[in-house]
Image (cartoon, rainbow, N blue to C red):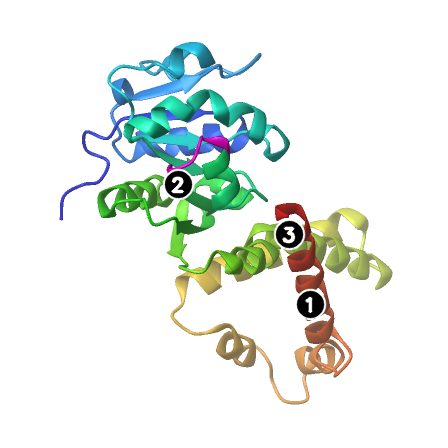
Amino acid sequence: MADPLKGLSVLLVGCGKMGGAMLLGWLGQGLARENVVVVDPGAGTSVPEGVRSVTPEEAAHLTPRPDLCVVAVKPQTIKTVLPAYAALAAQGTTFLSVAAGTTLAGLDQALGGNAAVVRAMPNTPAAIGRGMSVLVANDRVSDVARAAAEALMRAVGTVAWVEDEALIDAVTAVSGSGPAYVFLLVETLAEAGRAAGLPGDLADLLARQTVTGAGALLDAMPDDPATLRRNVTSPGGTTAAALDVLMAEDALAPLMRRAILAAQHRSRELAS
């Protein structure tokens, strides 16, 4: 299979934390520096050597036009930023947006209609190449453009596709917001350790390393999470005593369901 990044030309609009992480990932995966153009990276932000930086006015009239335009600006600015690139959309450039809360229809409308648009929901571990991104495309996106969009997002982690855009709200609730849930777990685990008598710095270290180590084990092993959980739970032991509390009918599982539903509902509100 041909490398979808080979010869691909990309315009990156927005080079903050997410945009910058993606850019480094693309270059690391072999995307040619001379094939990448970045729009105004902003004060205090530099682009890698060999990558050209242009103004929004220059970007809107690039010749030849880029194959893909990746939009990584803040969601609240996207409707004011995108109209300037309507000419590129009309000429056939595919747009890949990582802005949360803006639908395919909203992106298409901002680009003047009849645009080929892919919407992606990544998460913050993309900054270290361990992200989870879920993509959905409108029916104007070609197979070649789909492969290119997937390759760009795969450079910063794992990729999955959905065909029903309505699922993106649930994706946002689980993986988009999910890192915050894990960070909260570390906070509460450390606090519980302090309550059990541990010095604060030791409780923090134990909580952080336990969660990162368990995550690495989960990533390295073929077993599902339930199997890994059972593997460390001896009948009548200390882990079982804790899990009896966490797995009670009114404990973690229903609480997590309520949390995910709340995030999903808010995602729908923002999208509307």
Where's residue 190, x and y in %? 75, 55
In the drawing, what numbered circle is on residue 117?
2
Q: Is residue 60 left or right of residue 34?
A: right
**In this rendering, does residue 14 appear at all?**
no
Question: Element type at marker 1?
Answer: helix
Badge nearest the viewer, 3 or 2: 2
Q: Against 29, is 262 above or below?
A: below
Residue at image position (60%, 28%) is: 77
Residue that badge 1 annotates: 256
Sequence-wise, which precedes: disc 1 or disc 2? 2
Is residue 144 part of the magenta span, yes or no?
A: no
Q: Is residue 111 left or right of residue 178?
A: left
Residue flagged by tag 2: what amino acid is it? Val
Badge nearest the viewer, 1 or 2: 2
Q: CA distance from mark 3 to mark 2?
A: 20 Å
Is residue 116 part of the magenta span, yes or no?
A: yes
In the drawing, what numbered circle is on residue 267?
3
Residue at image position (80%, 49%) is: 200
* Magenta segment: 110-117
